Image (cartoon, rainbow, N blue to C red):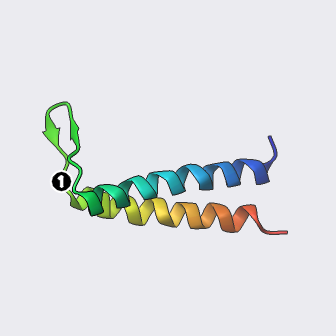
Amino acid sequence: MSQKTFTLTAGAIFTIVAVLHLLRLLLGWEAAIGGWHVPVWFSWLGLALAGFLAYTAFTLGTEK
């Protein structure tokens, strides 16, 4: 697998994660891990981090 393919694949995965965090925020989905209810602010953090990583991966993947 080439580096370009890897970064574009990583960018796509991070985009999916960011969209899922955004959907949780917009639709009010509950999240629980082992009985612990995940606070909504985790999705704000996850959205920002996954969005940044997706942007960075797509930027690196499309460089010449």
Instruction: Give amino acid for label 1.
Output: Pro
Label 1 crowding class (10 Å Cα cut-off): few <14, some 14-19, many 20+?
A: few
Specify whether 40 is left or right of 59: left
**Residue 60 in picture, x, y percent from top left:** 71, 64
> Considering the image in quadrants, where does the N terminus appear?
top right
Q: Residue furthest top?
A: 34
Callout 1 secondary element? loop
Location of residue 49 by image quarter: bottom left
Which residue is at 85% across, 69% downward? 64
Q: Residue 25 sits in which quadrant? A: bottom left
Q: In the rendered view, would you say 36 is above or below 4?
A: above
Q: Give me the residue at 53% from left, 57% from top.
A: 15
In the displayed structure, 45 sits above or below 39; it is: below
Q: Which residue is mark 1?
A: 39
Determine the residue positioned at 18% across, 54% down: 39
* Residue 27, percent from left and from top: 26, 58
x%, y% of residue 9? Answer: 66, 48
Q: Left or right of 41: which side holds 61?
A: right
**Given the current orientation, which residue lies at the most extreme front position?**
27
Q: What number of labels is visible?
A: 1
* Image spot of residue 37 (x, y percent): 15, 43
